[in-house]
Amino acid sequence: MKLTLSKGRVIVHFVYAIISAAMLIPFLLVVSISISDDDLLNKDGYKWIPEKINLLGYQVMLKASSALVRAYGVTIVVTVIGTLLGLLLTTMLAYTISRRDFRYRGPVTFYIFFSMLFQAGIVPLYILMTQYLHLRNTIWALILPLLINPFYVMIMRGFLAKIPGEIIESVKMDGASEWRIFAQIVLPLSKPALVTIGLMLAFGYWNDWFYGLLLIDEQKLVPLQLLLYRNINAIEFLKGNPAVQRLGVDYSHLPTLSARMAMTILAAGPMMIVFPFFQKYFVSGLTVGALKE
Amino acid sequence: MNWMTRELKHLRKNKELILLSLPGLAYKFIFYYLPLVGLLIAFKNYRYDKGLFGSAWVGFEHFKFFFTSDVSWRVTRNTVLYNLSFIVLNTVIALALAVLMNELTKRWFKVHQTILFLPYFLSWVVVGYITSGFLDYEHGAVNTLIAKFGWNPVNWYQEASYWPFILILVELWKAVGFQTLVYYAGIVAIDPSYYEAARIDGATKWQMIRGITIPMLTPLIVILFILGVGGIFRADFGLFYYVPNDSSFLYPVSDVVDTYIIRTLRSIGDVGMSTAIGLYQSVVGLVCVVAANFIVRKINDENALW
C-alpha cells in the first residue's frame, strides 16, 4: 500500500467519513437521550447533545428492575446454548456436503438447499411447537427454531470446500476416523468461518423477540428484546418497586424518557461491544460466492 | 439384489459421514419438513381440540376469502414494492461502497467497516425505539428541529405518506453494511494478477473497476439477486411491525404479508386463514425464484444458482 494519497483516494476517504458519520447519528441520539435529564427532555425535546447529564435512567433500570436481570439471564442462556449447539450441527452438516467423496452429497445438499427456497411459513411451525412438541413456555422454544439456518450451512460448506482434499486423504490413509478428522483437522482449519457463523448465530439469538412473542407468556422466560418491547408504553413495572423508592425517586416523577433509551442501550450494548473483537474474521469467513457448486 | 448389496457396501463405506450429518438432517426433518405437512391447515377449518387431521376440510375457502378482500392486494403490493426497492438500492449502494472500501487505507478501512456494520446487529425492537427518538410527536428530534424553524410539528406515526421513505431509509441503514462486506469479501478474493496486468497496460482505476471488479463480482451479484427475488414475498416482520410501531394509521403503506399473517393469527386467531396466506406467500416465492434462475440461466448458464 502506497503511503502517498492520490487525489482520488482523498475523495474516497472524505466520502466514507460522511457516510460513517451519517450511520452514527442515530446511535448518538439514543445515547444522548439516555444520559439526559428527564425534565429537560420533557421541556425541550430530544437532542443530540445532552443539556445536562443525568444517569438516573440507567440507575433506575439497573437497580430497580429484577425483570431486566432475569431477562438478561434468559437471553444469555439461550444465546450460549443455541450458538454452541447450532454451530456444531451446522458445521457437521456442512462438512459432509463439502466432501466430494461423500456418496450422498447431492441428495443431502438438495435436502438443505430446498429449505432455502420454500418454507411452510410460521403457522405450521407454531402448531408443531405448541400442539405436538409442547414447547410453549420452555427455554427450547427460544432455542430450537433458530438452530440451523440453511444459509449458514451453505456459507460454511463453501468455506470448508476450500480445505485441500489431499490433507484429509493423507490423514485417512493413516487410519484416522472421520470424527477425528473433523475434530482435529477440519475444525482448527476453519476458525474464520466458525467465528463468522458463530457470531451470526449469537446475534440472531441475542436479538430474537419473535419466538418469544409467539411462544412465551411466562414472565420468568421473557428474553431481553421482548422485555424491551413490552415496556414500550410505560416503565409501569417500576411503580411500587421498593428498590426505586430507595433511589429516592418520586413515582409521579419517574425518568420514563431517559430510562426507556437507557434500556434500549442495555439491550443492544453487549453485542455491540463483542462484535469488533471478532470482526477481522468476517471478510475471510463470508464466502457467500461459494454458495453454489 | 446385486444393486442392493452394492448400495449397502456404499452405505457402510460412508457410515461415518452419514452419522456426522444425521443430527442436522434429523433437525431439518422435524423443524422444516414436518411443518410442510401442516400446510394442510390451509385447506381446513382448524380447531385446536380436533387437531390437524381431525379438523374439517373447507377446500379453497380461506384463499377465496383472502383474495376477495381489499387486504390481499394491499399487502401483496406493499411487500413486493418494498422488497424490490430494497434489492435494487441495497445492491447498488453496497456495491459502490464495497468498491470504495477497497481504496481505503488499512486503518480507516477497519474504522469504517465497523461503523457500517454496527446497525446490522441491532434488533428491530431496538431500531423501533431509535426511530421513535427521531419521530416521536412530542419529544422527537425531528419535530424539535422543525420547531426551531417555526414550522408545525408533524404527527409522524399518523401520516402514511412519509413512511415508504422512512422504511426504506431504516432498512438501508440497517442492512447495507452486511451487503457491503459480502461484496467486499468478493473483491478481496479476485486474483490480484488481473489488476497487475491492467496496470501494466496503463488502465485507469475506473477502467479496472468496470473491466475487472464488476465482471468478477457478477456471479455473486446474480446469486444474491436470485435469492432476493426468492424472498420477494417474504417481508421482514420486525421492520414493518416495530418501526411503524404497529400504528394502524400507517397500514396502507406499512402492512405487508407477514404482519398481516401474524395479526390474523394473534388477534383474530384464524389459524387456517393465516396458514393459507403463508402458503400463498411460499408458492409465489418459489415460482419467482425458479423463474429468476431460469431467466439467468438463459442469459448466462454459469451464473445460475442451480
Image (cartoon, coloured by chain):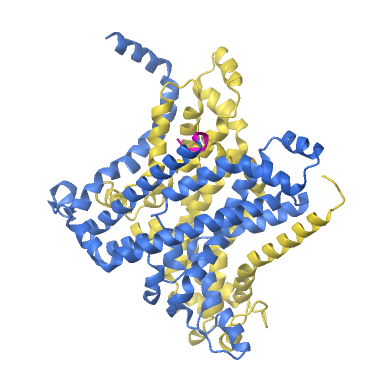
The hue used for chain A is yellow
Q: Percent from the top left, x then y, of residue B109?
A: 73, 52
Q: Residue at x 59, y 58 (%)?
A: A270
**Above or below, B21 relative to B181:** above
Side of B91 where A136 appears, left or right:
left
Residue B227 shows in this picture: yes
The magenta stretch is B301-306
Side of B296 where A278 appears, left or right:
right
Q: Residue at x 48, y 77 (%)?
A: A242
Residue located farthest toward the right when viewing the structure as drawn: A4
| Viewer-closest of A119 and A123 | A119
Q: Residue at x 72, y 46 (%)?
A: B207
| Viewer-closest of A140 and B289 | B289
| Viewer-closest of A72 and A261 | A261
Identify by letter the chain in blue. Answer: B
**Above or below, A144 relative to A263:** above
Q: Residue at x 34, y 14 (%)?
A: B8
**Above or below, B49 relative to A237:** above
Q: Percent from the top left, x then y, of residue A188?
A: 61, 31
Q: Percent from the top left, x then y, of residue B40?
A: 21, 47
**Above or below, B199 relative to A13:** above
Residue A59 located within the stretch drawn in magenta:
no
Report the quarter where the N terminus of chain B lies: top left
Q: Percent from the top left, x then y, of residue A40?
A: 61, 86
